[in-house]
Image (spheres, rainbow, N blue to C red):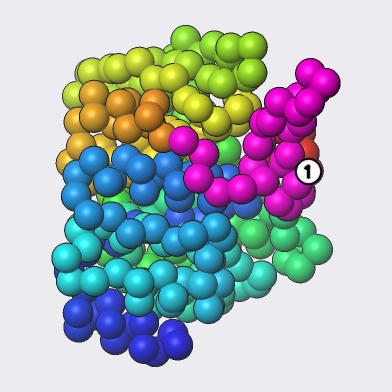
């Protein structure tokens, strides 16, 4: 399946390919990136968490020659896994969201996780773009391991794409001003997902959109219009009797639990 997808990517598709990895937030970010890029042209993204050596090739094969943007999610269980997926996908934009503790049991340290996640940006070429969090030191350090152009996102004052004036409404839906420091422009965003941590995912998605030619106004509008697309990630439901049910039960690691 991987060999078929690699051939199809090289011989048939002309889409610009974005690949996303990280310890937390991959699927939500993938959904937001797909929503942003759909404002630029026909876009294909994976359903749910199709991020394995089966799910990623299936997503590649679901695109067609008219697809302008192909968004892929990459998971891993050990070193070499993301390198394998990246050689199938050959992305021109590679996103590393964060280096957390989700794989400590398999890899032993956050530094080892960083090496494994960093395989994505090490496969990029000099005309490609690595999108990296400016708020996490290990993720930021991956800039030294790639020949690609680096675009940072986050809350840090020196992030190229950042959020300022973040506020939360009564359901913890975040509003903020999206700043594109590269051109000195900004635009307001109001997310529909619940949780302050959705801001980080949205900033990564914004950086991808800006890297691929969208302007900050389009990005802000697409982020504000995007509905949560994958289940069990901070799903908020009003139940009979006035209860509010928050279902964040898809998966769990310490960072995700704290965020929820």
Q: Name the image quarter holding the N terminus.
A: bottom left
Secondary structure, magenta segment, majority class: loop
> What residue is drawn where x is 76% and y is 59%?
104
Does 237 appear in magenta? yes
Counting from the top left corner in percent of width and height, residue 241 is at 82, 21
On screen, residue 163 versus residue 195, left or right, reads left
Query: Above or below — where is 132 with respect to 113?
Result: above
Per the image, label 1 sits on a secondary structure element best described as helix
Does 47 appear in magenta? no
> What residue is drawn where x is 35% and y is 35%?
206
Q: Is residue 83 visible?
A: no
Q: Which residues are magenta?
A: 227-255
Q: Residue at the front extreme?
A: 240
> What residue is drawn where x is 62% and y is 52%?
23
Query: Above or below — where is 124 with respect to 96?
Result: below
Q: Name the one closer to the observer, 100 or 228.
A: 228
The residue labelled by disc 1 is 254
**Image quarter of residue 245:** top right
Q: Name the image quarter holding the C terminus.
A: top right
């Amino acid at each position: 399946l991987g060999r078929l997808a690699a051939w199809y990517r090289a011989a048939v598709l002309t889409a610009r390919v974005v690949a996303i990895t990280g310890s937390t937030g991959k699927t939500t970010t993938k959904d937001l990136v797909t929503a942003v890029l759909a404002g630029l042209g026909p876009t294909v993204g994976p359903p749910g968490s199709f991020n394995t050596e089966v799910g990623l090739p299936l997503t590649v094969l679901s695109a067609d020659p008219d697809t302008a943007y192909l968004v892929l999610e990459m998971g891993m269980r050990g070193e070499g896994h993301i390198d394998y997926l990246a050689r199938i996908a050959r992305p021109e934009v590679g996103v590393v969201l964060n280096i957390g503790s989700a794989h400590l049991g398999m890899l032993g340290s956050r530094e080892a996780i960083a090496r494994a996640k960093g395989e994505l940006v090490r496969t990029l070429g000099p005309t490609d773009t690595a999108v990296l969090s400016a708020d996490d030191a290990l993720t930021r350090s991956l800039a030294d391991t790639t020949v690609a152009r680096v675009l940072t996102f986050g809350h840090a004052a020196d992030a190229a794409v950042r959020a300022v004036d973040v506020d939360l409404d009564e359901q913890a839906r975040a509003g903020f001003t999206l700043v594109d420091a590269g051109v000195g422009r900004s635009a307001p965003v109001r997310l529909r997902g619940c949780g302050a941590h959705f801001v980080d995912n949205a900033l990564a998605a914004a950086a991808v959109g800006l890297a691929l030619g969208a302007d900050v106004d389009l990005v802000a509008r697409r982020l504000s219009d995007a509905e949560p697309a994958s289940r069990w990630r901070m799903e908020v439901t009003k139940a009979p009797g006035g209860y509010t049910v928050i279902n964040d039960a898809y998966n769990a690691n310490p960072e995700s639990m704290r965020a929820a």
